[in-house]
Image (spheres, rainbow, N blue to C red):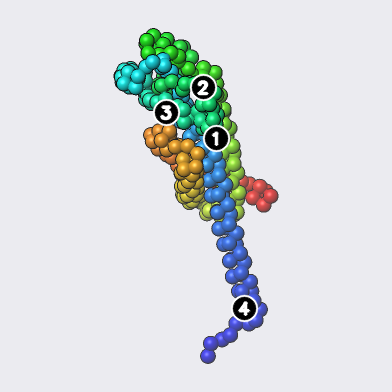
Amino acid sequence: MQKLLPLKDFWSMATRKKENKTLRRRLWGSRVSTVISISLVLVLLGAAMLVLLNAKSVGDWFKERMQVSVILKENVSEEAAKGYQAVLDSLPYVRTTEYISREQGIREMQELLGEDFMDAFAVAPVPVSLDVCLHAEYVSPDSLKRVGEVLKASPLVDEVVYQESLVDSLNENLGRITLVSAILIGLLIFISVVLIGNTVRLSMFSKRFSVHTMRLVGATRGFIRRPFMGRAALQGTVAALIALAVLAAGLYLFDREFAPVLEIFSREILAVVALTVLAAGILLCVGSAFLVAGKMIDMSNEELYS
């Protein structure tokens, strides 16, 4: 006949099971919060890197969509205008051209000024024109001025119009964005080192007694550090993958709702950012675990219980 446990021993065993379950739950909660904290830092770091490394691509995208309006003279025929368009397409600094007929110009003016704006004119005031987009390296005040002089030299051209102030503003803002992104990345790297170090330290602090026990039985520093660094590498990898998933989702939503981001951003730079985020997550966590484990190994008895 099986002997029944005394009620006191049964209650003690149940209490220990409950405490172990609570401890495991807290441990898992600590690990999850550690991974989430590291992921948030890596998301910010990755976003800042995307802005900095793709600043030129973004600037070139805007520059190549800035239009130079070439307004032709009133007596220019459609055939002559399209022949001149072919000449412009062959120029090395021209990226694209678009032919704007009188009818299309009138429709655009009606959308802008109203359906009855033509009533004030005896003849159609809208001439044939060409919208010209240049390659990015030619979209600067000096280059645009020279290009405008070349275009005006044609006997078919009446006027060349472009927004010079917009070009100056675009170039100035791109420089500012690059500078701000560089400073932000420096701050984020510093913050990530401090935050990840503190997060790893808190997650490892509960193991200080285990470290002390291993040290007492003669375990080497490398043997004690190894499991902590392995766990930190796993946490860093998981956190980096979560951060990359968040960044990918953000790029997809931004591309879908606002602008063709995936068309603007270089695929090579996207790969570099992804690898950098992954490497940063692993290296920062492993480095922090290495340092924290070393400090725990060197703890005195007073520090151990403080």
As shown in the figure, which amino acid type bears the numbered disc 3? Answer: Glu
* Residue contact at pointers 1 and 4, CB within 8 angstroms: no
Q: Residues within 10 Å of mark 3 (few under 14, many from 20)?
A: few
> Which amino acid, mark 4?
Phe
Q: Position of residue 89 (x, y in %)?
A: 33, 21
Please provide percent x and percent y for residue 228: 50, 49
Closest to the observer: 251 or 96? 96
Q: Which residue is mark 2?
A: 121
Judge depth for marks 4 and 2 and give the one in front.
Answer: 2
Where disc 3 sits, the SS reads helix
**Residue, disc 4:** 10
> 284 or 42: nearer the eye?
42
3 vs 1, front mark = 3
Q: Earlier in the sequence, mark 3 or mark 1?
A: 3
Q: Residue at label 3?
A: 103
Query: How far apart are the two marked residues, 2 and 1, measured between alpha carbons?
Result: 64 Å
Q: Which of label 2 and label 1 is nearer to you?
A: 2
Q: Secondary structure at mark 2?
A: loop
Label 4: few (<14), some (14–19) or many (≥20) C-alpha neighbours in 10 Å: few
In the displayed structure, 26 sits above or below 76; it is: below
Pointer 4 with pointer 3, Cβ within 8 A: no
The Cα atoms of the two marked residues, 1 and 4, are separated by: 53 Å
Name which residue type carries label 1. Answer: Ile
Residue at left offset 53%, top offset 87%: 2
Q: Secondary structure at mark 1?
A: helix
Which of marks 2 and 3 precedes in the sequence? 3
Frontmost of labels 3 and 2 is: 2
| Mark 4 vs mark 2, CA separation in Å | 102 Å
